[in-house]
Amino acid sequence: MSVKDYLAAFHRRRKLILLTGLGLLTVALTLAFLWPPTYKSTATILIEEQEIPSDLVRSTITSYADQRIETIKQQVMSRTTLWKVVDQFNLYEDLRKNSPAEEIVKRFIKDIEVEVISADVVDKRTQHATKATIAFTVAYQNRSPELAQKVANELTSLFLGENLKSRERQAQEATSFLQQEAENLARHIGEIDEKIASFKHRAGGALPELMPLNQQMMNQAERELTDIDQQIRGHEERKSYLEGELATIKPNTPILSVTGDRILDSFERLRALRAEFAGAAANLSPDHPDIMRMKQEIDALEKESGQAPDAEEVSKRLIDARTALAADMERLGSEHPDILQARRKIAALEQETGRLRTVPLKPLTQRPENPAYINLQAQLNSSTSSLEALRKTRVDVKRRLQGYATRLERAPEIEPEYLVLTRDRDTSGQKYQEIRSRLLEAKVSEGLEVQRKGERFSLIDPPSLPEKPFKPNRLAIVLLGVMLAVGSSVGSAALVESLDRSIRTPEQLVSLTQQFPLAVVPFMPNEEDFSRTRMRRRIIKTAGISAFAVMLAIVHVFFIPLDVLWFAALRRFGAG
């Protein structure tokens, strides 16, 4: 087909092309100018790293930022939370009259947009380039710009608050878990300590760890036993020697002074002083100084020797005095001074006898007087005492030696059970120290989160009041409508032309009949054809003027008033 043929086809299908193009263009223009505007308010939240270096304080929150954002998103966009926001701002009032709550929440979720912002950073641990989430946006779209801003602000507050609560909750849960584990381990260690203490008490020193000490103590006891046996033999030989020497010496050999006089001991001096006191008491009164002096000496000697006066001796002297008095009475008479003195002596002896009968008597033992005997006796007593002490010590050392041997024999039997207890104690102790260390770190990390020093969300761009609608894009709709109108009109004309089998040119007749026509008679319009053409032109003019008027009205209502547009055009061309 030539250009003339295309022009002829366009002329034939001009009605279809115009109707299709104008129809689609009208729909596009209507959609572009009558679609109500939708406004979107957006907030940008920055993810800031913790202020204190992680090398000093390590946080217990180990998840990545995008994971936490997704988790918080699911928490914030739960049905309960969103429905509170819907009730608070009275959203979707028309939709709530006829739709269930689930459909309204779905519509609300559809109008919310959460997008993460990533950047190319260098990983501090691996020193490799990677993608990291540094911020995210929270947006909400609504037909009212004020309502879009308020809801976006509320959603931003929910995200920020939920992040703080989530981090604090995770830090507290980590601290609580570690605290519980530490308490359980401490309780377990206490139980093991009690078992070990009870086991040690039952073992009686036969622990495997004490085997070297028990062996050392056993060797020391053996050496002590050998030394004691040698000492016992030495003391037994010395005792036998001293007993033999003591048998050859008399214990009561008198002790003489330099002048040859016998030196009396305390017993003999007490006996002589008592006899002198009995004779002096017959001649002197009880208050006489000599009598009082002798009484004091007698008391001192009695305390020194520990021997009370002998009642039998005093009774014997009393009998002798009475016999002598009876003999002198026959010879001298009752008034003779000797007779009076004898009577006073008898009275003193009777008084002494009466006193001594009330005092319990101690047996009188004769003490040895020979210094050599006394020395040997002392050495013998010392040797005997040492020998008895050594024998008692030997029994004690023998008992200790037997105890150490028993411990060494029992050690291999109780070693497996003891190793199980100590291994459990050591393992639990190491785990407890590790848990305590982590617990301290978790408490520091909890303080980090409570004081807002850890990683946090910072609002760097709060939701603003949108001035321009987010959608629809009216220019794009118009351009798309124009393109669609042109394409549809041309396509429909081409489709109709291809389906039309009419013969309109001589060339088509030649190709069909293989014969060239003799003449071509052109179309000759009549008066009726002219009137239809004039009517069609008037309709087209009227439709064009109406469409232009509609466009002016749309511009005046939705874009800019015509008077403002007129004065703006005048200023632009310098005529204002």
Image (spheres, rainbow, N blue to C red):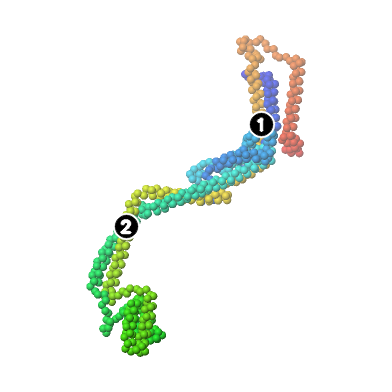
Q: Which of 195 and 356 lies nearest the eye of the viewer?
A: 356
- Return the residue at label 2: 401
Give the structural element (helix, strand or loop) at label 1: helix
Please indicate whether residue 125 sits to the left or right of residue 224 in the image.
right
Point 73% across, 26% down: residue: 544
- Quarter of the image containing the C terminus? top right
Q: Any mark on residue 185, and which?
A: none
Q: 145 or 485, which is in the foreground? A: 145
Q: Does dot 2 land on a helix, a strand or a loop?
A: helix
Q: Residue 245 in the image: state x and y as whole percent.
A: 23, 71
| Mark 1–mark 2 CB contact (< 8 Å) | no
One can see residue 539 in this view: yes
Residue 382: quarter of image: bottom left
Looking at the image, residue 215 lies above or below residue 458: below
Residue at image mark 1: 477
Q: Horizontal placement of 371 versus 1: left or right?
A: left
Amino acid at dot 2 = Leu
Q: Position of residue 482 (x, y in %)?
A: 66, 28
Coordinates of residue 507 in the picture (x, y in percent) = 63, 14
Relative to 219, residue 282 above or below: below
Mark 1 is on which residue type?
Answer: Ile
The crowding category of the residue bearing disc 1, from other C-alpha atoms within 10 Å (few below 14, some 14 to 19, many at least 20), is some
Query: 60 or 267: nearer the eye?
Result: 267
Q: Residue furthest front?
A: 330
Mark positioned earlier in the residue sequence (1 or 2) = 2
Q: How many marks?
A: 2
Distance from label 1 to label 2 (Cα)?
110 Å
> Depth check: 259 or 295 in front?
295
Picture quarter with the N terminus: top right
Q: Is residue 422 left or right of residue 13?
A: left
